[in-house]
Image (tube, rainbow, N blue to C red):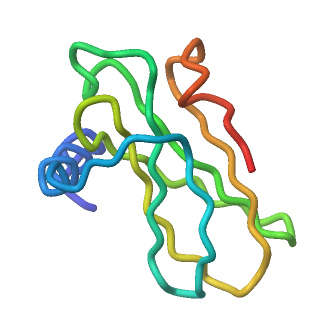
Amino acid sequence: MSGINRRTFNRSLAMGLALFQRAGKAQTRDVLQHCVTEWSFSSGKAYSDPFNEIEMDVIFKASGGVEERIPAFWAGDQSWRVRYAPKSTRQYSWSTVCSDTSNADLHENAR
């Protein structure tokens, strides 16, 4: 992503996905190797300017211990989403990290 910063990238994704909003906590899904899967997270806390106030990442950890940190994007209202395509067929767990550590809906959720 040379020449584009994280917030601009997230803003572009969010604008394109505004029509596909869905409320709810993190969703569990079966995922296939190299196939993109999307999870949604709903914040009980509202932000007046989510692009500039917080950042959220999801850390996916493979059974072998390899971790990948994927940035989530704001999808409108109080909804955040992340897309992930596993590189191998292993069991994965995930946890969330939010710059607003007081937001229990977006920070330190795990499966």
- What residue is rendered at 54% in x and 30% in y? 106
Q: Is residue 85 above or below residue 7?
A: below
Q: Is residue 45 above or below residue 30?
A: above
Picture quadrant of residue 28: bottom right
Q: How far across and down, in percent of the image, does residue 34 sit?
A: 52, 86
- What residue is rendered at 16% in x and 48% in y? 18
Q: Is residue 55 above or below residue 90?
A: above
Give the quarter of the figure containing the N terminus: bottom left
- What residue is rendered at 58% in x and 53% in y? 69
Asked if residue 61 lies left or right of residue 17, the reply is right
Q: Nearer the viewer, residue 80 or 60?
A: 80
Picture quadrant of residue 82: bottom left
Q: Nearer the viewer, residue 48 or 67?
A: 48
- What residue is rendered at 33% in x and 29% in y? 78
Among all residues in the image, which is located at the extreme right? 64
Q: How far across and down, in percent of the image, does residue 22 sit?
A: 33, 48
Picture quadrant of residue 60: bottom right
